[in-house]
Amino acid sequence: MLSIVEIDFGTPPLRTVEQVSLQIDGVSVRVPAGTSVLRAAALAGIRIPKLCATDMLEAFGSCRLCLVEITGKKGYPASCTTPVEDGMRVATQSRKLADLRRGVMELYISDHPLDCLTCPANGHCELQDMAGVVGLREVRYGYDGANHVYPEMKIEEPGQEWPVRDSGDPGRSHGRPANPLFAARDESNPYFTFDPSKCIVCSRCVRACEEVQGTFALTIQGRGFESKVAASQDQSFLDSECVSCGACVQACPTATLSEKSLIAHGQAEHSITTTCAYCGVGCSFRAEMQGEQIVRMVPNKDGHANHGHSCVKGRFAIGYATHPERITKPMLRAKISDPWRIVSWDEAITHVASEFRRLQATYGRDSIGGITSSRCTNEETYLVQKLVRAAFGNNNTDTCARVCHSPTGYGLKSTLGESAGTQDFDSIESTDVMLVIGANPTDAHPVFASAMKRRLRAGARLIVVDPRRIDLVRSAHVQADYHLKLRPGTNVAVLNTLAHVIVSEGLVDEAFVAARCESDAFEQWRAFVADPRHSPEAMQAETGVPAELVRGAARLYASGGNAAIYYGLGVTEHSQGSTAVMAIANLAMATGNIGREGVGVNPLRGQNNVQGSCDMGSFPHEFPGYRHVGDDAVRTQFERAWGVPLLAEPGLRIPNMFEAALDGEFKGLYIEGEDIVQSDPNTRHVTAALSAMECVVVQDLFLCETAKYAHVFLPGSSFLEKDGTFTNAERRISPVRKVMQPPGGHADWEITQLIANAMGYPMHYRHPSEIMDEIAALTPTFAGVSFARIDRLGSIQWPCNEQHPEGTPVMHVDTFVRGKGRFLRTEYVPTSERVNGKHPLLLTTGRILSQYNVGAQTRRTANSIWHAEDVLEIHPHDAEERGIADGDWVGVESRAGDTVLHARVSERMQPGVVYTTFHFPESGANVITTENSDWATNCPEYKVTAVQVTRVTQPSEWQQRHETFSRRQRALVDDDAYIQPG
Amino acid sequence: MKAHVDHLVTMANDIAHFFAVESDRAKAADSVARHLKQFWDPRMRRRILAHLTAGGAGLEPLAAAGVRRLAELDHVTVA
Ligand code: SF4
Ligand code: SF4
Ligand code: SF4
Ligand code: FES
């Protein structure tokens, strides 16, 4: 079912500039050339009946309901497949057309159940609507013959009369012969059902799976009246290749494919536009509501990042907000072995303020700090760094981007001048060559992956640089031209070899470099990468990538047309993360692939608001807008606005806070929405640091791993319960809108404000829009941003200012933000984390589609049906050597610690490399990761840990202790603290 | 002086590894120092400076030169 508020124009919009004029039912219409007659009519407010067409899909022309008459043309062409022509005269209504349409509808309805009153689509069923529109009054064919509606045949035999059944309930038998065409409902998917008896075989679902999602899980099997929709090899949806994106459910004009939530609740009555709180794609959604009950989430057709598409997380995995483990009362305790005491907000806030002030009085001003998550809104992260800088009086503020994309900020700022991706997502439509490095978009950025696949199907070429054979390397109708299967930890080496080929084979865009980049730096860089030690042949032994593949990939990237680089955490989460980002920027500059549509350097951000939390001054060394705290002019501006003196020195980053805590110098931490115990490396180090603190304040939805070490718990709000904005990977600021009240009573920004006031620093915002106004007033790149403008435009890509009042889709167009682009020499420095006799394998980590990061949200939804535990992927060769079979328990041991997981023997891995995800706390993936980090930003080296893997029979000691500890911690929470049902 | 100076030494060495590509040693040391000044909180800087005064065990030459240059930027005297 389509959104309840969107108008379906029948066929997709076109980007053509040329306009043509025509007349439809006497109304003059002017539309882009190539537009369908159906869409042209819809744009003029004329609704032509239709069934197989919808504007999320290309026209198909199968139902013959959209027939029209066109002056001078014979017959009755289908308006969905007929393009407009200049001067065309179209009639959409005539007696003949009415007859034809009624005939079509009669056929459809004769094989469709008539249980409209109890059907979940009732009120929004397109078949029902069309029956009404064409004036269908009778169905002459009856249900006696072949049909898909009833489980049993109605056979009239002499002397025997069976009553015709009025519902297709497969559970009841009347002892008649089974209907071979009937198929029972498929309830296997946790979020939607497939009821074939209602299917009109319009193939909208099949086309949605192909065109929109790119998975090709559905087909139409059989011919004529026998034809039916099948998932994969006629499997259940759950067992098929379906990734549960929901595009088919949205496309289905009948109740055949329906959300289970819609079946449970009935039709929504209002809709609120908001933004997904999961990944960095930042899909826009319409929350379709009954009062405060979400009926379903429908991706917004007008959403600039997603254009009406979504993945399983954003569309379906929202149940965590009302999960029974949600804590909604403030709680305190003196020691972490004490039971939690439910207290009033007043008591909790007063306690936090007095403890923080006590710690500062005892241990010094710098003994406390604050951390936010990239799941928080811009306004919330802004407020927390303001609390730290202005009320705490130090700069000990950080965000979880520290552990994911901090190298992006540093690397891109040093080379291009701005800590952000250069393009909008739509830019990919003009891309000829994609270079994907250290990213797994089909799992981590699914909606953008669909856009990539669409472009690849249209002929773009693909280079993948990844130790694993990610799905993009080969999937339905997509095949990478090059897969550089490098050894983990050798990104910089590989990037240097690519650069070497570009420089030594004369593939540099000399004109671009001369005009746009610093020439001295470029010449130094050119000489550096030209050195034979950077040749693919010389580095082959180190990187594991055959030299000829590197040469081929470099040539393709440099000379294949518009080339765009997309990268993820496989680039940043290394000891040389920042260096790799610079090396990427160097490649783009050297080949002139920057500053226009179709090219660029594009970090795919992990969490929804990674970009935003960095923009908002969450890092200890910079104010909002990436300006160093040591910059006197900037600091003075903030001092004036905030009314207090501010420190000119950088504060502690997250790992530095831990070190300082273990040194006894850091005692209090305010943590908003971030689960550092699970997500940060070397868990034991993190828990030791937290245990050394005297006041750990956790503001969260659940008793997360970090909360188990906390002294104060403040119930936070989910993205459904507050207003604000998120900024996605393309710098797009999108609205987050409250659709229900926060069950804890306060939105997160309000809680921060309460703490500030209690600490004697006044904050009096009445609404997050006022916070955004302050951000805009203090941050040049946000100068033009306001809630009102975001609402008007739908979303805004910063920079948004006087020169770019509606935002900036593509950056660095005529000059780089820093003026001239700066090449930096990127020496490859192998990580100190090397394999050795004791730890002969390299472990690397990643994500999976259905789960999200630490899993706090997705684990509390039915998504766990796809991924109920983290497993260790291991190559058959390594498995065999260790006597490991698929499904065995295996111990994974590094120099930091050990854990136990189930093994999955898989050829996706290369020999010598093992892989796991980190979505479940009990997996202890970060018990094994080490304290190694990026040289520039301290972003942890999650992607490389030397380990040994052995077959074992029981969970590790850490897991057993963790299990006991967690059980005890859960028992310390009073039942009344949890969300109350109803 | 507590245990975690070792970690600071590793971090300083890592930073120096990046800037080592610059053949002009004074320039390279200055880059290391500026990086430390820009990103390390004053406590960490004081600690690494004190460590240098105490002999700078474990600091590789360029890292040590960087810390020495940091002393000038931070107006601190090191031995
Ligand atoms: S399931 Fe729905 S969309 Fe698919 S063919 Fe049947 S009616 Fe059409
Ligand atoms: S839910 Fe998505 S992947 Fe699954 S069949 Fe439908 S369109 Fe295809
Ligand atoms: S998780 Fe990402 S891709 Fe999926 S709906 Fe949300 S923003 Fe879109
Ligand atoms: S809507 Fe045009 S043929 Fe179906």
Image: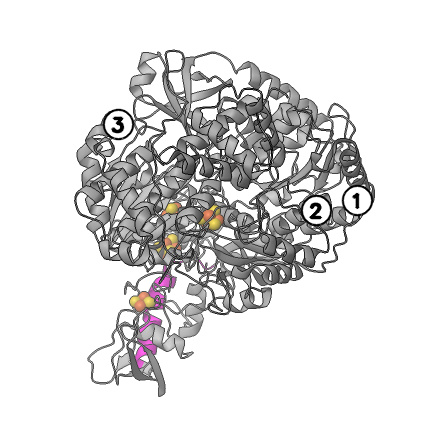
How far is mark 1 from mark 3, CA to CA?
A: 57 Å
Residue found at x 34% / y 41%: A583
Amino acid identity at mark 1: Trp
Q: Are marks 2 and 3 on the same chain?
A: yes
* Residue under label 2: A982
Q: Is residue A886 above or below residue B22?
A: above
Whether label 1 lies within 8 Å of ligand 3 gets the answer: no
Residue found at the very far bottom of the displayed protein: A26
Q: Amino acid at mark 2?
A: Gly
The residue segment tinted magenta is: A96-114
Residue A811 left/right relative to A865: left
> Which element is circle 1 on?
helix
What secondary structure is the magenta-colored segment mainly?
Answer: helix
* Front of the two marks 2 and 3: 3
Is residue A80 visible in the rendered image? The answer is: yes
Mark 2, secondary structure of its residue: loop
Chain to which the residue tagged by mark 1 belongs: A
Residue A285 image offset from top left, x and y in percent: 51, 56
- Could you tell me which chain the residue with mark 2 belongs to? A
| Residue A345, disc | 1
Residues tagged 1 and 3 counted as in contact (Cβ below 8 A) = no
Cα–Cα span, label 2 and label 3: 58 Å
User: Earlier along the polypeptide chain: callout 2 or callout 1?
Assistant: 1
